[in-house]
Amino acid sequence: MARVFISVGSNLGCRLKNIKNAFEFLKTLSLENHLRTSFLYETPPFYCLEQPKFLNAVIEIKTHLLPMNLLSVLKSAETSLGRVENFRYGPRVIDMDILLYDDNIINQDNEMLVVPHPRLHERTFVLKPLCDLIPDGIHPQLNKSYEELLSAFNSEGHYAQVLPLVSNNNSDSENIWMRDKPTRLMGILNVTPDSFSDGGEYNTLEKALERAKELISLGADIIDIGGQSTRPGACEVTVEEELRRVIPVIRKIRESGLQTIISVDTYRSEVAKAAILEGAHMVNDISGGKLDEQMLLVVAGLGVPFVITHSRGSPSDMATRKQYNNVIDDIAKEMAQQVIFALNNGVPRWNIILDPGIGFAKGLKENIAVIKNLKKLFSTDARKCSEQQNKNYLVLKDYPVLVGPSRKQFLESLILKKRNFQSGSFVRTLDDCENTFEKVCEGRLKRDYATAACVTACVEAHASIVRVHHVEAMSDVIAVADAIYK
């Protein structure tokens, strides 16, 4: 059984659909469904410059096919996927090249197949995704790691990591976003009677549709639709009830002609699948696939973006699970395990978005620590930690990050430090804030100015998406913060 790395590229037609079709084909070649993918990159053309930009990725498979047999199968697949004869280095519907075949050095049939790929070391659009998979791997002939080969280039502008957003494999639309800029705004649409901020406001079809239109007009890039409250202590509803709340709303939005990106906020695979089939684009799971053993298989099969959120337990008991040794190291370890589990269940790396889970199994001090350490959590820059901790952080490196601080309880707790609520006495410590909140603050508190401060911090930390209630105000905040920090 050989470990093989294959580059995949497209710059004609719906590039994203072409890449996904190639990925599905490579699944059929890989034993035990062993596929690992790089992130997805948009790159300018090499060699022949007068052509559209490419989408590129590298995919690792394990196969019993011998090198020449594998090459023959790939060439046949390119033809079946729509590739036509063209001039060398010209535009391609799909292009699949064998980069590495174990550590073998191969030169067969008058250079019909040369492995390692003879131009691997000069192509940043291949080296970059290859480094997502094996940065420390050694080129069998050049005796240098792929990270060393990549670092030899001034690669700024040679590639841009993208987040693919399509509703399903049959879509011919191409919707890709650059990972870092501009920051994308996810507007919240809860079709529940008991969500902490807007429960009961949009739980009819007419109200939900009008709110969706309003969110789009105010600047939302994504609408996140949820039919099950995930606030701490929330009562669980049945799958049937969640489907009854969510699916008609998605259907109504699509029937109205709105083409905005729709996210479904659920930890149930049955709801996720039904929502995607109705036209949703992505799944936002507060458990990251832990509360439903079928979720990862479903999102892998559907080929849609998947938000992995850090949390512990379920909404009914997460408030009792706030004990950490070191909150950032512990979150890194637990999220790394979730990411590896998702990858091992067939979710492509390019479809994973990470959310540190503000408010989920975290108290005031933990939430503040997460926001202060977003860069540390999702970047390896200037980190001093143990070898095992470093491995956890490396797993999380370079994924797009979503943060949802909007109107969370900890914001009001912080505000209490500055406000005098009882007999002229001010709250002095974070612990006092949290305790006083429970006594003083009842009902719904919007906390939007405080949310704006958190959103600014998230933009500075290069979050890709922020999830908010007050879309109009946060759109202005993001516009200014992007100009300053991105």
Image (spheres, helix red, strand yellow):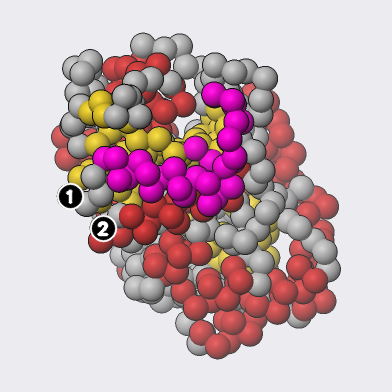
* CB atoms of marks 2 and 1 within 8 Å: yes
Magenta highlight range: 67-95
Q: Residue 136 occupies which quadrant of the picture?
A: top left
Return the residue nearer the eye: 405 or 432. 405
Q: Is residue 206 left or right of residue 356?
A: right
Which label number is shown at residue 1? Answer: 1
Mark 2 highlights which residue? 31
> Can residue 432 be spotted in the picture?
no
- Numbered disc 1: secondary structure: loop
Give yes or no for residue 80 being in the magenta stretch. Answer: yes
Mark before the other along the chain sequence, 2 or 1? 1
Which residue type carries mark 2? Leu
Location of residue 142 in the rendering, given as x and y in whole percent from the top left corner? 23, 15
Assess disc 1: are there few (<14), some (14-19) or many (≥20) residues with their C-alpha within 10 Å of its C-alpha. Answer: few
Mark 2 to mark 1 CA distance (whole Å): 8 Å
The residue at 30%/59% (across/down) is 33
Q: Residue 210 occupies which quadrant of the picture?
A: bottom right
